[in-house]
Amino acid sequence: MNSILDRIRSRQARVGIIGLGYVGLPLAVEFAHAGFDVTGFDVDEGKTSQINAGKSYIPDVAEARLAECVGAGKLRATTDMTQLAAMDAVDICVPTPLRKTKDPDLSYVVRAVEAVAASLKAGQLIILESTTYPGTTDEVVQPMLEAGGLRADADFFLAFSPERVDPGNQQFTTKNIPKIVGGVGPASNDAAAALYSQVVSTVVPVSSTRVAEMVKLLENTFRAVNIGLVNEIAQMCHKLDIDVWEVIDAAKTKPFGFMPFYPGPGLGGHCIPIDPFYLSWKARQSGFECRFIELAGHVNGAMPEYVVERVVDALNDSRKAVNGSRIHIFGVAYKRDVNDMRESPALDIIELLIRRGAAISYSDPYVPVLKEGAHTLEAVPEAEALQRRPDCVVLCTDHSSFDWKALVSSGVPIVDTRNALRTFSAPNIVRLSGRVGAPVPTPV
Ligand SMILES: NC(=O)c1ccc[n+]([C@@H]2O[C@H](COP(=O)([O-])OP(=O)(O)OC[C@H]3O[C@@H](n4cnc5c(N)ncnc54)[C@H](O)[C@@H]3O)[C@@H](O)[C@H]2O)c1
């Protein structure tokens, strides 16, 4: 035990990160920047060779910082899993998607743990970071690692520490987001807390891996349910002819007991649309139905259809049908200023519009090429797209580089799913909810 703690505290510990995506790469750079000797492991050779060439493919990871770590010999990447044997600590950051049936797909975790188990040594610290259901670390990972005869919390150390990074968030990053740590026992807890305290400002130890796993799922379920609620309120406000964003802005002036969530075209990314179903799946194994999760999933999952209804309204005003219309999408990434397309609601909206006979084009500075089903589209610069006078624009993602003034003054009907055009009042703006171009009174 002392040996791993000493190696961590003196920053001599060799750190391995398995899975160099949105979570793993920022973490690897953080450890390397703090002086640790870091090896990144990934099955994708394209990613490992970009890292070794000092190139960043994650917008949140500054290329200069990455190149500095690689140049200083503190960070390298490989597809060779046998090198895991040389690591003192290993962080597993591989994907945890859902199967088509909405059941957890732990196959990436299992493959990564198999690689770790193949060369597990006494004294190693293994941490799972991938979001997963409570029980994964002690029911799935621990038996796989102990199969070779070493005992967790005695011979080696095992913990779960959820990643809470929010891609694109400039204020909160890997370094200053408090890190939850739960070990399979006290020694594992201490080792994992010692490791993270070298690179993150606050470590929050909890009593078990299950609590740590549950914390992450509570956080993301809280978001999914509240977004579901506000999406339903947005649809209700539309019927009542009330501007839902004005309501939220006023409600959030209450200094306690209210937290603003905003409606939109639907959930996206690798977390909020997926993680709550890990929890409901696990609860179902114990005969418990998570009604809030199912309901929020239902409301949020129906938002792309609701957006298409708004498009139908917008076209109807110009006596047009969706069938045969040229519809241009502004922003296809799942949220502002990121290039992540996973579960993006824009994909569903595009699919629904194509099925109704629309011809689709799009602009997105972060996504040069888009594959949706059988269709492959190339991004069109926004000015060129507006010159072509589409029948309707659907604003799906509010990237900060978009020129809203040019969009509004083009006169093309715009369905604004993000309230990005809140400061404009023009007849060509169709809001997701509420009156068209409702003027907002100036505060007295
Ligand atoms: N993206 C986010 O915002 C975010 C935030 C918090 C938590 N998480 C969680 O973190 C985990 C990772 O998410 P991500 O967004 O970084 O995923 P990602 O797809 O961006 O990266 C995962 C990486 O793992 C690699 N990989 C897959 N199987 C592997 C294996 N067997 N061995 C080595 N490498 C392998 C992939 O090639 C990929 O590069 C998920 O559980 C996710 O839910 C993600």
Image (cartoon, rainbow, N blue to C red):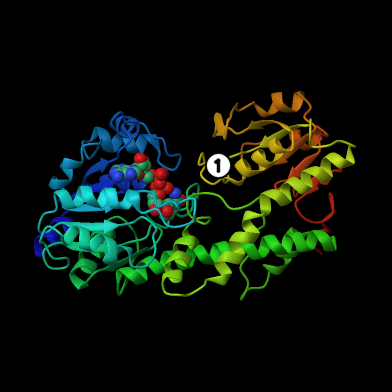
The answer to whether 40 is drawn above or below residue 223 in the figure is above
Q: Which residue is drawn at 21% across and 73% down?
A: 186
User: Between 335 and 26, which is closer to the camera in this rendering?
Assistant: 335
Amino acid type shown at disc 1: Asp
Asked whether the viewer can see residue 285, the reply is: yes
Q: What element carries label 1?
A: loop
The answer to whether 133 is drawn above or below residue 368 in the figure is below
User: Between 352 and 63, which is closer to the camera in this rendering?
Assistant: 352
The answer to whether 117 is drawn above or below residue 406 in the figure is below
Give the residue pinned by disc 1.
Answer: 337
**For residue 188, which quarter of the picture?**
bottom left
Position of the N terminus, as image quadrant, is bottom left
**For residue 211, which quarter of the picture?**
bottom left
Q: Residue at x 13, y 46 (%)?
A: 86
Residue 52 lies left or right of residue 258; in this view the side is: left
Residue 122 lies left or right of residue 289; in this view the side is: left
Residue 54 lies left or right of residue 81; in this view the side is: right
Q: Where is residue 358? Give x, y as percent.
A: 74, 33
Q: How many marks?
A: 1
Position of the C terminus, as image quadrant, is bottom right
Asked whether the viewer can see residue 31, the reply is: no
Q: Where is residue 182? Give x, y as percent.
A: 30, 68
User: Between 75 and 282, which is closer to the camera in this rendering?
Assistant: 282
The answer to whether 311 is drawn above or below residue 410 in the figure is below
Residue 87 lies left or right of residue 370; in this view the side is: left
Neighbour tally class for label 1: few under 14, some 14-19, many 20 plus, Cα within 10 Å: many
Q: Where is residue 165? Give x, y as percent.
A: 43, 54
Q: Where is residue 397? Give x, y as percent.
A: 63, 43
Q: Residue at x 62, y 36 (%)?
A: 401
Q: Which residue is drawn at 33% across and 67% down?
A: 135
